[in-house]
Image (tube, coloured by chain):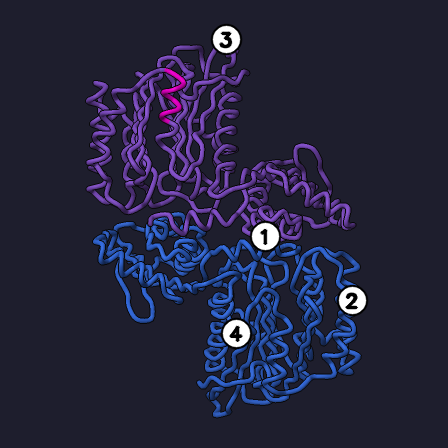
Chain colours: A blue, B purple
Amino acid sequence: MKMIEGGVCAVDNILAWGSRKGKYGLGILYAGKSTAAAVFTSNKIKAEPIKLTMKHLKDGRLSAIIANSGNANCFTGPEGMEDAQRMAKFVAEGLSIPEDMVAVASTGVIGRKMPMNIIEPLTQKVLGGLENSPRGSRRFAEAIMTTDTFPKEFAVEFELEDGNKARIGGVAKGSGMIAPNMATMLSFITTDVKASSSQLKEALRTAVDETFNMVIVDGDESTNDMVILMATGKSGEIDDNFQEALNLTCRELAKMIAKDGEGATKYMEVEVLNAKSQKDARRVARTVASSSLVKTALFGADPNWGRIIAAIGYSGAVIDEKKVSIILESENRNIELIKEGMIASENNRGLKIAADIMNEDEIRIIIDLGIGKEKAKAYGCDLTYDYVKINAEYTT
Amino acid sequence: MKMIEGGVCAVDNILAWGSRKGKYGLGILYAGKSTAAAVFTSNKIKAEPIKLTMKHLKDGRLSAIIANSGNANCFTGPEGMEDAQRMAKFVAEGLSIPEDMVAVASTGVIGRKMPMNIIEPLTQKVLGGLENSPRGSRRFAEAIMTTDTFPKEFAVEFELEDGNKARIGGVAKGSGMIAPNMATMLSFITTDVKASSSQLKEALRTAVDETFNMVIVDGDESTNDMVILMATGKSGEIDDNFQEALNLTCRELAKMIAKDGEGATKYMEVEVLNAKSQKDARRVARTVASSSLVKTALFGADPNWGRIIAAIGYSGAVIDEKKVSIILESENRNIELIKEGMIASENNRGLKIAADIMNEDEIRIIIDLGIGKEKAKAYGCDLTYDYVKINAEYTT
């Protein structure tokens, strides 16, 4: 498996482009006649473009995606649905494809009418720029950013079991309203493997479950989440190697979202080992990564492991406090804080090392529950002054 | 029902006192031979004093409480249990009562050995100060404060159905690790009604469920939560009037905890009306009051009601977005933002009033789900720079 440049455009025949005007951005992706599958937010309030895209995807086929940032087109009623339909129509006309082959995605403020007077000319501009190049993917990734501080792209080349070379490319955006079970997270992934929509769906579910669904920024779950996977079918048949490459793509994009969490200064991975069930492993990983107290301790580089213990305790998972071990780790060092329920590093030297680790940019918290064989990993960040600042002033 | 002064000491024969040394505080309450009941944290990691108090309360009787702040005595193993037992013993010896008539409560940093060299002399000092006076209750309330900015006391006098006058008095502490289902919340409540331990337990469960269990500061659930109710039996029999007075006492203490949430500048009540089930009403109230995005919007006085809508949507409750109404209210005004799924105040004047309301100190968010008859209320606060500051620097 080889990481390559080019994001969604690393895959042959995929065209992409994007543009911005003020706080609004718009990106279009064209993939010819592709099979497709998607995962949507589980929020019961769904934005209008989510409803439309669900409908358009019913036959498992898509040709294009139009995605805008700056306005979520959510809780906007029948008028909002009309706006989403118009966006699909602009693209369908521009590319001479049926309207129901176009997915629409939006991210931004909820409950505001779409600024169609800005969206329409932006759409025409972006249609004119579409190209199969790293630049095209980058412009698309930039166009869908909201409070993101960097565009998120990833691509990989790998060999299928039938000997064909295949590729997967993706773009994504974060970076607030990020909770377990998706987030205001948009991600669009392309590939050239041959696969039915149901094969793609199964592969995407598997990958999303252990990657995007394990990212936590603030625990608020968005009304607009959407991950779409489109396959052009120009290479070989879908197989386990594809699944592995897709997992990697989703994981790397998920990590970028966690690293770019609103106001984040630090990236945290919470790895849970030896849980009694898979559900318990996921619960503990997510609860610790979600804890405001763990997140602020991380920001303050305060090795207050009691907050990790408390979060494990209220996660709902089966635990035996006499079996719990906790290790803190950074790139260059690690320290065991708790070993099977006993304080392993109470002396000042131990806490000093722990504080040093927490002062680094990327921290892993490894929790060994010691009572089973299941494991899980969650991806998060610290809670900072800037998170409060960004979100206290968001719509003003 | 008449609000009175005196906190826990508003009840005859209740002695209390407290003292502090540096970051450690210690309070003792003496209630003679009382029946008692308690509610404890549901965190699976329980502090040693919680385990000890559960044991001492098995027979439904208590005479005294010793509570300290600054150290949670949690995850401290057999040595921690010995320390909790020694605290009970100091009090038992000082008051000439059996050890198993003493409840022990702790709050503070997790995973640190109790500083018994400070606790022991403080205990002797406090035992010497015990008195039945408003000053006694106040000193107790001050001694159990951690990051609290004011002591929390409440007392009420009321008439029982049998014609007897009775009283209830309480003290509490907040103010971080405050989640649905209790919090690092200690509360000690006294009364002079006659009641068995099981009667007290039922009354306390009822009151706690709609008050302390609906307070949210940061969503982190503590290992040390404890609410104890002690009844001296000097007045008439427990009845519905008592329940009403107990609900009021718990509600007022719960509100004080929400108002004094770490770093809070604003108090928020989330009232949910016409939910399909009681569970749904509680879920929606708690989810909105817990949302980091709603809490930061409150801090920034940003009338971003889309975040309320998103939180309602991911609460897990049954909803019909076409039936939802949202009203924002302060002491002097209110504005309907959403009326049965439609934006009711999109014009600038509406949003201006909403912003003005959010600039006040106490804000009510009223959510009418319009699909049933159940209601619930949650108590919370904003998420501020100071919450981050307090918790980034907590143990250092």
Task: Name the amino acid type tagged 2.
Answer: Met
Which mark is drawn over residue B162?
A: 3
Q: Nearer the viewer, mark 3 or mark 4?
A: 3
* Amino acid type of the residue tagged 3 in the rendering: Asp
Mark 4 or mark 1, which is nearer the start of the sequence?
4
Marks 1 and 2, how far apart at CA: 27 Å
Which residue: 54% across, 37% down?
A: B379
Lower position in the chain sequence, tag 1 or tag 2: 2
The vertical placement of A379 against B287, above or below, is below
CA neighbours of label 3 inside 10 A, class few (<14), some (14 to 19), many (20+): few
Q: Residues within 10 Å of mark 4 (few under 14, many from 20)?
A: many
**Share a chain, discs 3 and 4?**
no
Residue under label 2: A116
Q: Secondary structure at mark 3?
A: loop
Q: Which residue is mark 4?
A: A203
Q: Is residue B148 visible?
A: yes
Disc 4: which chain? A
Which chain is mark 2 on?
A
Residue A163 in the image: x percent, y percent? 48, 92
Magenta segment boundaries in residue numbering: B133-140
> Image quadrant of residue B88?
top left
